[in-house]
Amino acid sequence: MKHFFLLLAFFFAFESFSQTDFKITTGPYLQNVTENEATIVWQTSGDAMSWVELAPDDSTHFFRVERPQYFQTHIGKKVVTRNHAIRLKNLQPGTAYRYRIYSHEVLGGTGSSTQYGKIAASKIFKSTPLTFRTLDTDKQAFSFLMVNDIHENNELLTNLLKNVKTEKVDFVVYNGDMVHDMRSPEKIPTGFLNKSVELFASEVPFYMVRGNHETRGLHAIDYMHYFPSSTGQPYYTIHHGNTFMIVLDSGEDKPDSNIEYGGLAAFDEFREEQLIWLKDVVKSDAFRTAKNRIVFVHMPPMPDHWHGPWMVNQLYVPVLNEAGVDLMLCGHQHRHYYHEMNYGGCRFPVLVNANKNKVRIDADGKGLKIKVLNEQDKPEFEVKLIK
Ligand SMILES: [Fe+2]
């Protein structure tokens, strides 16, 4: 009889904590990495309270001592959610860190008690902890890769980025239209995010430039959940080595009232707000004193074209011409174009990258080396912008 009750107790205990196959479904991946911060993002199959443990990248075993824990909090509370984004602050520039993520499933609660389920965490026992490195404005030279217009083609993404970890690049830029649309919450993970994590994104950050296709569908409003930035907006800056980079958002390609947008587009107002921000950015010391200045924007500036590219030309180009920019990197057209300085009123060169190529930029004190490579890693175009 005693055994029966023990068995019954075990059964109920097992049942209450095993009703779901609780697990990490996407990530972790690095976002908003700066000199002093990094945000670790992941998703779980159910609601959970989450944290990150952070350790220096030294020879000590990860479990030698208790590592500091960083929780996802909001207005004084630890957040219970499926979308986890934990911002690590007060980091040192150019410094490597090791990390592990944890999510404790939350099954319910009354206020004074919380019913927890399983814990899911990144693997650590049989593999080394994940690592990342913060940016460093004192770094003399660095490299990055850019791809765009992948449109959920995971095979193409793999061909272009399968060697990120061995190519000695500090980060990757996704210059928009990585998905067809955001009609469902699965689009971003299955479209390119899960593959990115498999290839590199847990340890090498990517910076997202929103394309017009990421603005489509009812889940487009959740964009910042996936790609948190220092500004809280899809436009922001990246400062690394001797190079200052501005990420702009070009919005949709047609006028807001176009029937294709279902009455939900408001990009004219958004671009005007962004213009005010951009005017402040180019006044900053960090921008003015940088050796190299790069602008990323999904839609290239085009005079007398569809509304979006035309607005990029009308609004942003005059500010950038005045401020002085070395290079603009774009996508959207699915073809390679390299416009020399002064094309279309731009007092800087514009490289439009084809959807099946990647761009490699090597930046140092002498300027920028630009190389365009195809899926077979064969160079298709090269140019040096030497100062
Ligand atoms: Fe596009």
Image (spheres, rainbow, N blue to C red):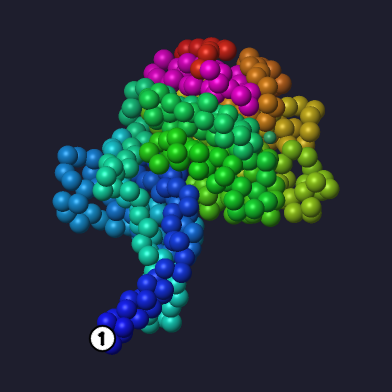
Residue flagged by tag 1: what amino acid is it?
Lys
In depth, the one of 362 and 84 nearer the eye is 84
Instruction: Name the residue that disc number 1 marks.
Output: 2
Q: Is residue 378 visible?
A: yes
Q: Which quadrant of the render holds ligand 1?
A: top right
Check if residue 309 falls in the magenta segment. Answer: no
Report whether 269 appears left or right of 66: right
Part of the protein shown in magenta: 347-376
Q: Secondary structure at mark 1?
A: helix
Q: Is residue 325 above or below residue 338?
A: below
Give the image location of residue 263, x and y in percent. 79, 54
The residue at the far bottom in this view is: 1
Report whether 177 appears left or right of 172: right
Q: Is residue 372 above or below residue 222?
A: above
Give the image location of residue 137, x and y in percent. 36, 32
For disc 1, the neighbor class at 10 Å (few under 14, some 14 to 19, many from 20) is: few
Report whether 196 appears left or right of 254: left
